[in-house]
Image (cartoon, rainbow, N blue to C red):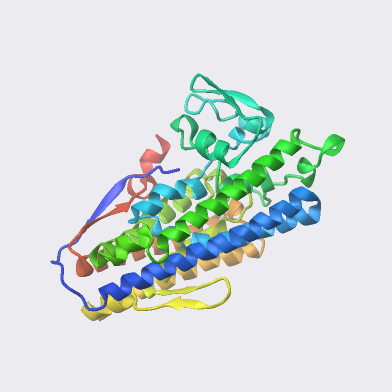
Amino acid sequence: MKRMMTAVIAATLPAAAFAGEAEVVTTYADIAHAGYEDSLIKAKELDAAIEAFVAAPSEATLAAAKTAWIESRVPYQQTEVYRFGNAIVDDWEGKVNAWPLDEGLIDYVDGSYGGATDENPLAALNVIANPTFELSGETVDASEITPELLADTLHEADEVEANVATGYHAIEFLLWGQDLHGTEHGAGERPYTDYLTGDDCTGGNCERRAEYLLAATDLLVSDLEWITEQWAEGGAARAAVVDDPAAGITAMLTGMGSLSYGEQAGERMKLGLMLNDPEEEHDCFSDNTHNSHFYDGMGVHNVYFGKYTRVDGTQVKGESLADLLAEKDADLAAELGSALDKSVAELAEIKAAAEAGFSYDQMLARGNEAGEELIMSAVDALVAQTREIERAVSVLTEADIEVEGSDSLDNPDAVFE
C-alpha cells in the first residue's frame, strides 16, 4: 500500500551523449531479467513445496514450505528497485508484493482484529469460510477458489488497496497466520492442522484454505513468468530502456532514489518505528522483514555497480552507472558508492541482530533504544545515499526526476494527525 508524497529532484546540467549509456542500460536490463528469472525459479520451488504440504500436511512439510517462501524473497526483493521509473513494473507489482493487507479478507483472524470498517467493508470477509458473498451489490460465487477469482474479483476489491488477495504476502499469511506477539519475539503460529481434512481440521474450511493457497501460488508463478518475459530480449520493459538509453538512465536513478528514500527509509522503516507498530513491517507474518530490508538495499547497490549474484552463484555484470558517473565526476562516483556501501552495511547490522534473536518486532518497541538505534542508523544512511543520488542526477541527466517521499521523513507531524 502506498501512503506517500512526491518530492522532485531537479537536475541542473544539460544532457550530453555519454559514452557507454547504451551499455549501462543493457546491464540494467540484464540484471532485471536475471532477478525476475531467479524469482520465478524460486517461486516454482515454493509452488512444489506447497503442493507437497497440501498433499501431506505435517510440521515438516509446513516448515519446508515456509523455508521455500523465505528463500523466494531473496531474489525478488532485489528487483524492487525496478518498480520506480519503469511503468510496466509499477503497474504490475501490486499483484505480487502489495502490503500491508487486511488479512481478514482471506481467512479467520483473532478476535482482537475487529471487523468491517468504513474504509474497508470487506476487511473481515473471510472468503475461505464463505463460498458466496456480496460485492458492490452483486452476489459473487466463490464456491471454487481459483486464480481468476483471486486476481479478477478479490484483489483490491471495491478499489481498496488493503484488500490484498494475491502475491507473496497473501501466501505468507496462509503459511504463518497472524503474528499475535506484538513487539515481543515471535512470528505467526498457524498450525499445519489448518490444512488437514475431516475431524482433524482446525480453523475450519481446511480444503478451501488449501485451494486458496494453491491458487495464490499458481498465480504468483504466472505473474512472475509474465514479468520475466518483459525483460527478456524483445520484451517491452527491456525495449523501453534499451531503445532509449536516456530514459533508461532516468529510470535507474528514479528507482534508486525512490526505493532508498520514501519507500524504504520512510514507509518501510521510519514509519513503523514512529508508530511502534509491527503491523507496518513488510513481512509481518513471518518476521522476515530484516531480510526484506537488506535485499532491497542490495537491489539499489546492484543497479549502481552493475553486478548481481544469481541464486546459482553466477554473476551478471557489465558496464555500470558507477562507471558512467566516474567519467563525469570521479569523486562523486566514489562518494555515492561509499554511501551505498554504508547503507548496505547498516541493513546488514539489522539482519545480523535479527538472526541472533533480536527480532525486528522487538526493535520497533517503544523505549527499545538498541532497536531504535539500529533502525535509525539504516534510515539515516538511506537518506544520505539519496542525497548523493540527487547529486548524480544533476550530472547524468537533464530530466526532472520524481522520487517517492514519505510523511514520516518529510512531515512527521502528519503521521499522527
Q: Which residue is drawn at 65% across and 57% down?
A: 46
> Residue lying furthest top in this view?
137
Q: In which quarter of the image is residue 72?
A: bottom right
> Residue lying furthest left in this view?
14
Front-most of residues 6 and 140: 140
Q: Residue at x 47, y 28 (%)?
A: 119
Q: In which quarter of the image is residue 233?
A: bottom left
For the question of whether residue 211 can be seen, the reply is yes
356, above or below 174, in the image: below
211, above or below 270, in the image: above
Q: Position of residue 62 (x, y in %)?
A: 74, 53
Front-most of residues 225 and 34: 225
Q: Which residue is drawn at 40% across and 54% down?
A: 89
Horizontal side of 224 relative to 49 (left or right) equals left
114, above or below 29, in the image: above
For the question of whether residue 365 can be seen, the reply is no
Q: Where is residue 302 in the image (x, y as percent from the top left)?
A: 43, 70
